[in-house]
Image (cartoon, rainbow, N blue to C red):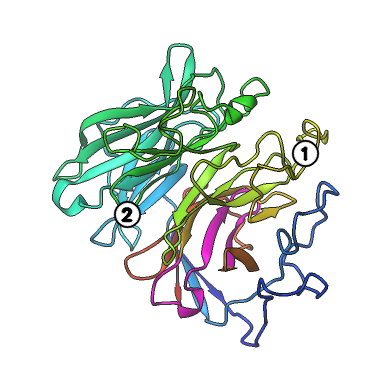
């Protein structure tokens, strides 16, 4: 079934606050109307509950298909179609009119329990020539399971992955089914950034702070799974050479800013405290030592501190949670006013967040498709300049100029 949602947007001007504004001045009313879970004080004005903005360009959102099964990752192909992962272990090719391929075979088995399964996907920068696909998944191993990275060649008839090979494993293994991270992106030099989770449990949380563990990290590896030369900890004997940043909880979004080239991420907080971070090499992002969230039980986490010297502050955080997942920066020509805006799929929030960023600060937030009652799992920009998003319920949306 296909349907079109027409969104009529106010054409009046709504100004948002620049990051140079004095802390004594008031921000416009926040798009968030619900009370926060905690009474914690932010580190700076505008770090949370920023003023609302509205797009002035009318747009429409079209459901292209509802035939996907728990899609998790989506990536544009050079011809304008998309490759999509389904958690149970399938790749699908989807056209920009919603036609679905049969499941693509040849992938290693996945541990499709809880938050595990077939996760993020990307394609080689030279895909037109080598047809190489890279993906992350939760892999069953002795002692439990963990986040793994694999690669393989999409066959010419697109029926299977040829020569699938696991190139990296985020050890140690753990007998759980939560917090795998799992996003994967190519940098401009042809190497990979991959996110991992700290596996959620109290016993594994401290590993986010351990440089000898692959849990709760952003890693930087080659297409062979080796540490990239020049990584921040390569000369440190007690650290893994592939680590790029640490102190993460469950990174579910990775994207490069189209102009600055900076790497940004989002990660789930516990109850509240979902974060947007600007990733710098070697930096510690604090989990579980600092957080703006609380336990799901309502208890405070650890010593309940939110700022500590030497630990990075999030550029932005949400409380209450929106459960951020896949994200992308917009650099198309269809919506000039969206240039360099960050689009974040939100699960429990059931919307797509548009964040306006200036000078590495969030200065405005808009919530798109909030009336759709969908858990938005991943967001990407199509070759046509439209925004495409997949939801846990199996939909593929196209958001385009009306």
- Helix, strand or loop under label 2: loop
Q: In the rendered image, which residue does mark 1 sit on?
A: 294
Does residue 333 show up magenta in the picture?
Answer: yes
Would residue 273 appear left or right of 388 to someone viewing this image?
right
Q: In this view of the protein, can residue 395 be seen by the observer? A: no
Decide if residue 399 is on the left or right side of residue 223: right
Badge 1, how many Cα within 10 Å: few under 14, some, many 20+?
A: many
Q: Nearer the viewer, residue 195 or 9?
A: 195
Q: Position of residue 3 (x, y in %)?
A: 47, 66
Q: Which residue occupies 26% across, 28% down?
A: 165
Q: Which of these two is toward me, 352 or 14?
A: 14
Whether 53 is among the magenta residues is no
In front: 237, or 383? 237
The picture places residue 27, in percent across and down from the top left corner, at: 76, 73
Q: Secondary structure at mark 1?
A: loop
User: Among all residues in the image, which is located at the extreme right?
Assistant: 39
Cα separation, mark 1 vs mark 2, equals 37 Å
The reply to whether residue 250 is visible in this rendering is yes
Rendered location of residue 215, percent (x, y): 52, 29
Residue located at (66% from left, 42% from top): 310
Number of marks: 2
The numbered mark at residue 44 is none
Q: Residues within 10 Å of mark 2 (few under 14, many from 20)?
A: few
| Quadrant position of the N terminus in the picture | bottom left
Which residue range is magenta in the image? 330-356
Q: Please name the residue shown 59% across and 65% down the image.
A: 355
Q: Is residue 202 left or right of residue 83?
A: right
Vertical position of residue 343 compared to residue 217: above or below: below
Mark found first going from the N terminus, 1 or 2: 2
Judged by depth in the image, the label closer to the viewer, 1 or 2, is 2
Which quadrant of the structure image shows residue 162? top left
- Residue beneath label 2, please? 188
């Amino acid at each position: 079934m296909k349907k079109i949602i027409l969104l009529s947007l106010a054409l009046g001007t709504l100004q948002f606050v620049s990051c140079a504004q004095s802390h004594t001045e008031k921000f416009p009313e926040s798009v968030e109307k619900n009370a926060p879970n905690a009474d914690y004080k932010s580190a700076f004005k505008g770090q949370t509950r920023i003023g609302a903005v509205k797009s002035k360009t009318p747009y429409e959102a079209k459901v292209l298909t509802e035939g996907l099964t728990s899609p998790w990752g989506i990536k544009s192909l050079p011809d304008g179609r998309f490759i999509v992962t389904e958690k149970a272990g399938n790749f699908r090719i989807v056209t920009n009119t919603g036609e679905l391929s049969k499941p693509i075979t040849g992938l290693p088995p996945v541990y499709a329990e809880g938050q595990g399964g077939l996760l993020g996907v990307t394609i080689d920068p030279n895909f037109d020539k080598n047809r190489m696909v890279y993906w992350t998944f939760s892999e069953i191993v002795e002692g439990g399971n963990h986040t793994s990275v694999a690669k393989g060649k999409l066959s010419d008839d697109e029926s299977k992955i040829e020569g699938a090979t696991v190139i990296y494993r985020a050890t140690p293994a753990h007998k759980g089914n939560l917090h795998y991270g799992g996003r994967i992106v190519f940098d401009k030099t042809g190497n990979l950034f991959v996110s991992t989770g700290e596996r959620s449990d109290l016993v594994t949380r401290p590993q986010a702070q351990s440089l000898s563990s692959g849990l709760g990290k952003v890693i930087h590896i080659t297409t062979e799974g080796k540490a990239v030369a020049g990584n921040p900890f390569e000369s440190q004997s007690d650290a893994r050479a592939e680590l790029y940043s640490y102190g993460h909880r469950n990174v579910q979004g990775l994207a490069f800013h189209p102009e600055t080239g900076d790497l940004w991420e989002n990660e789930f907080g516990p109850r509240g405290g979902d974060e947007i971070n600007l990733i710098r090499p070697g930096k510690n992002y604090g989990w579980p030592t600092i957080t703006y969230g609380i336990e799901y039980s309502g208890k405070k986490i650890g010593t309940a501190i939110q700022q500590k010297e030497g630990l990075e502050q999030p550029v932005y955080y949400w409380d209450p949670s929106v459960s951020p997942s896949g994200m992308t920066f917009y650099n198309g020509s269809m919506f000039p006013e969206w240039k360099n805006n960050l689009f974040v799929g939100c699960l429990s929030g059931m919307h797509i967040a548009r964040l306006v960023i200036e000078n590495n600060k969030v200065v405005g937030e808009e919530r798109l498709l909030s009336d759709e009652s969908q858990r938005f799992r991943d967001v990407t920009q199509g070759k046509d300049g439209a925004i495409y998003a997949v939801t846990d319920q199996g939909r593929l949306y196209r958001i385009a100029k009306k």
